[in-house]
Amino acid sequence: MAKPPSKVSLVKNVTVYSAYLIVVWAFYRFLFKFPEDIEELFIKPLVWLLPLVFMIRKEGLGLPSLGLTFKNLFPAIYFSLGLGAVFVVEGVITNYLKYGAFNFGANIGSLPLMTSLGLSFATAFSEEISFRGYIFSRLWTALENEWTANFITVLLWTAIHVPIAFFIWDLSLSAGLLYLGLTALFGFGSAFIFARTKNVWGSIFLHVLWEWPIILFR
């Protein structure tokens, strides 16, 4: 039976992976602009998830260590629906205040609704496996403190969203800070669900529920 990785090894792996992800993804945002479906279905899984295949093999841990399991699936979904409802209501209210009426279609773009929803799930899968399934779970194991691990993960999670906020969407400073604040808030909630269920599917569903209000009032 393989010896489990040490705490120092886990922290080292998370540091290397996080630095790689933030630097490489920032360069990608600055240098390239592919269609959203190509980016979310092919490029992001390649850049974000492929290294994790090697990481978990190196650690001797399997997919369940990333929360890819059916254990506690329904509690995870219930948690995500409850917390996700807060984001949905917030998004609807903000949309109304911004436009003076409910104006959702303008922000979905030219893609069909179900296609946009499918891309949201693809995005959520890559990002939640990376941040909650790997980074948070390893930090939690190594530090033996859920909240410290959550805080560090949120900092990394927020940092990787800075380029898209200011250089892709070209948000104003106030709008960008609001978006990053919501991003951080979601990160705490997503890790909170993961910590109680050890199941990443709840985080994925919550991600979709969080992302759609962002789309609707952007």
Image (spheres, rainbow, N blue to C red):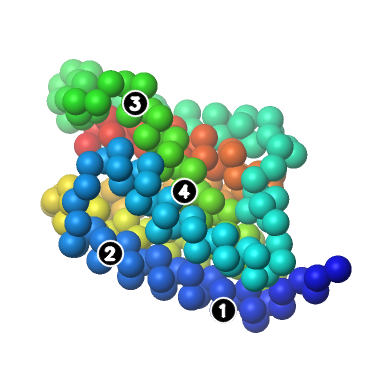
Is residue 209 among the parts visible in the rendering? yes
Q: Earlier in the sequence, mark 1 or mark 2?
A: 1
Q: Residue at x 59, y 38 (%)?
A: 202
> Marks 3 and 4, Cα distance to the nearest angstrom?
17 Å
- Residue closer to the observer: 1 or 153: 1
Q: Position of residue 100 (x, y in %)?
A: 15, 22
Residue type pointed to by label 4? Ser
What separation in Å lies between label 4 and label 1 (alpha carbons)?
21 Å
Look at the numbered disc 1 and give the secondary structure of its residue.
helix
The numbered mark at residue 126 is 4
Q: Position of residue 91 (x, y in %)?
A: 33, 31
Q: From the viewer's perspective, is 197 left or right of 187? A: right
Q: Which residue does the numbered mark 1 point to in the structure image?
A: 12
Q: Position of residue 71 (x, y in %)?
A: 74, 39
Q: Could you say which disc has been placed on residue 26 in the image? A: 2
State left or right for residue 114 relative to residue 29. Answer: right
Q: Nearer the viewer, residue 43 or 27?
A: 43
Q: Amino acid at mark 2?
A: Ala
Tag 1: residue type? Lys
Asked if the residue under mark 2 is in contact with the one under mark 4, i.e. CB atoms within 8 Å, the reply is no
Q: Is residue 94 above or below residue 30?
A: above
Q: CA distance from mark 2 to mark 3?
A: 26 Å
- N-term-proximal mark, 2 vs 3: 2
Tell me the number on the disc at residue 115.
Answer: 3
Asked whether the beta carbons under mark 4 and mark 1 sit within 8 Å of each other, the answer is: no
Q: CA distance from mark 3 to mark 1?
A: 38 Å
Q: Position of residue 63 (x, y in %)?
A: 66, 52
Q: Residue furthest bottom?
A: 8
What crowding class fits label 3: few (fewer than 14 Cα within 10 Å), some (14-19), or many (20 or more)? few
